[in-house]
Image: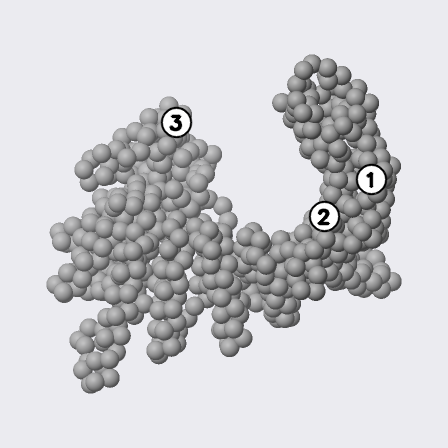
Amino acid sequence: NPSNDPITKRSSSSSSYSFRQHDKARDLDVEVYNSILVAYSREQTGDHAASVMKLLDRMEHLAEELDMPSVRPNLRSYNVALGVISNSASRVDTSLVGYYKEKNGDDDDEEREGNHTKTKGGNNNHKSKSFNPLYAGRAAESVLGRMLSSNFRPDAYTFASVLNTYQRIPNGKLDAALAADGVVRGMESLHLHDRIDEPPDVFHYTMVCACWSRSGEQGVAGERCSEILRHMMERDQEGYPRVRPNIRTFNAVIDSHAYNGRVAEAEDMLLSMVDNYESSARRSMDGIEDETLPIRPDSFSFNTVIQQWARARTPEGGRRAENILDRMLQFHHDGNADVRPDERSFAYIIYHYTKGAGRMSPDAPDRALKLLRRMIGMHQQGYKELLPAYNQNKTNPIFAFTSVVDAHSVLRRSDAGIVGEELLGAMAKLGETIEALRPNTYACLSVLYGWSSCGSIDAGERATALLRRMEEDMADVAAKNDVADDDDDDNEKPSSIMRTTQRCYILAQTAWARSPSVRKAEGASEVLEMMEKNYAGGNMDAKPTVQAYSMVLNACAFADMGQDKNGKLVKASPENQQKAFHIAESTMNRIRKEPYPRVLPNPVIYGTFIKCCGRLDLPDDLAVQSATKAFQDCCRAGLVSDFVLTQIRYALPPELFLEALVKNGYRDLDRKGKSMSRDGKRIRHIRVGELPEKWTRNVVNSRS
């Protein structure tokens, strides 16, 4: 920093420098300072853009004020500084903000306006408070201007550094694109007037297209990139060197269309490239060689269009993306071996059908499953990049599997559980070589969700079997850790990646409750016992909750129906129903004793138990006594909700319902028509708000 250096001092009231020359200062030359600039360029961390700008300022002022031409920046100085500025351009909190405020004060509006804030028509597209001043770009162009004013002839690298700076600026959007566009047009003008040796080449134009692609300007970006592409072709015809568009140029133009809402135009351009290349290949087979070979699309070309169709907010986007994937595979099999799909090629479309706009289509789960099976099959045939052992995109491939299962589960598909088991088995097999695909808790939760939503007769059994598999894995890991304890007590012990959680057990209980199995009550109760045992064994993530007890009661309440051998729903036997009631009664007694801190009956517990009394085929006195007792306890606890009131109304005959209300303190029965119809057979709907306040005092929003 010049303000702290013993050689230079900076005035606090002016931007000018004052100097005290050292006796040995005349021994300095530009290469000494260049070595410092190179050191900054090799730093892998930190933002040194302001530092190199200050160093250039210092070199220029020393050369002018102390008549030391030996330290005047040369072409290398400026190019190295541009490289540092370009590398720092991606930082939002750039050090150049402080540099410009220190250099020009707070009022630097004149440097913020102009080409960076105006479109071709001169309209300001950004309000001042959200304006990005593009400090890195201003600094890069400032260095370029110094070079030109010093009669240096900037080379292609110099302009590439300036363009790369604009390309890397975060949130530069339209301002960065316009500025980059201006730089390359300025480069053309400078070459025309013999101020530089080389005209812009394919790399300069391609970087401008990349800036437009990131601009977010739907109505401008794609069209401007197409104009640049045509301009490059014209200049190539005119004989300018190294300006013929290459695959990166075409990809940048495709990218600009696709990412700015014009996916159809991007698709047309891609398919045109494919047709032109294949036509040229056919002519070559016939012995006719084209003077200029057409550009061959690569994997990026196809993936860009696939990704943007998959992200489209229209249901047809998935099918359009599938068509491009099929065209890519056909192009690959037609002799373009290096144009291959990768994990993104399939994952984008799978997510469209499972999480995106295509998820509402009735056949969306089937299409997603078909794509995933195809992806797995191609991986087994040798396309290892579809499920790489090391994922360069930092996205876990397990999400593609779980999203397909979830798509079936959300729609309550009858095959959701079967699909989940199939994909879990595929993950287990692939996980032998691909670490990221080893089944973990997240994957198991997805499969349990599938069993809980499918409603098949064996759903509860299959879900419980998966729970036991998870518990066995936990036990195996714990046993290995116990053996390791004898050898090394210091290292942290690994834990099971299939660790069970509260949600795992509750989903298994839900699978039992929704199953037509006659064992649903017993199965849900067994899962609760597994949960309690696992928690007692030290798994804090498996602590039983109120919901776990209510799920047992819910399974008992619907144990009045079962599926016979012919697959038809029939009434369950009285023995099965009474057995279910005894399980419900036992569960109710356990939760009344608060088995775990704050695990106590709530309105759902009381209401579901009363539902058991009303739905199950029980002796009349047992049903009435049990429902009345549960309602009495609920009133005393202040937990009577609309759900509880509805269940007691349907569990008891009208006269016994009114009797239960009166016994617990309801007094509003005397006025005509208040509680019963004129024929005395129907009960007028009594609202929760009419009940005694003490009955509902502990229910959230009970009086509404």
Neighbour tally class for label 3: few under 14, some 14-19, many 20 plus, Cα within 10 Å? few
Identify the amino acid type marked 2.
Phe
Mark yes or no: residue 104 visible: yes
SS at mark 2 in the image:
loop
Q: Which image quarter holds the N terminus?
A: top left
Picture quarter containing residue 138? top left
Left or right, residue 9 beside residue 142: right
- Distance CA(mark 2)–CA(mark 1): 18 Å
Q: Position of residue 12 (x, y in %)?
A: 40, 25
Q: Could you tell me how many numbered marks the image carries?
A: 3
According to the image, label 1 marks what residue?
A: 620
Identify the mark nearer the N-term, 3 or 1. Answer: 3
The image shows residue 604 at horizontal and vertical percentages of 72, 36
The residue shown at (27%, 56%) is 265
Select label 2 or label 1 by which is in front: 1
What residue lies at 22% left-to-right and 58% top-to-bottom? 229
Q: Bin the neighbour count of mark 2 within 10 Å (Cα to Cα): few under 14, some 14-19, many 20 and up.
A: many
Residue under circle 3?
Answer: 11
Q: CA distance from mark 3 to mark 1?
A: 99 Å
Marks 2/1 in contact by CB < 8 Å: the verdict is: no
Which residue is depicted at the point 47% across and 55% down? 362
Residue on which the image places disc 2: 558
Query: Does 165 appear above or below 6?
Result: below
Query: Which color scheme is applied?
Result: one colour
Question: Which of the two discs, 3 and 1, sits closer to the camera?
Answer: 1
Question: Which sits in the foreground, 672 or 158?
Answer: 672
> Can residue 638 be spotted in the picture?
no
Which amino acid is tagged 3? Ser
Which one is earlier in the sequence, the residue at label 2 or at label 3? Answer: 3
Q: Does residue 679 appear left or right of residue 44 in this picture?
A: right
Give coordinates of residue 698: x percent, y percent: 74, 25
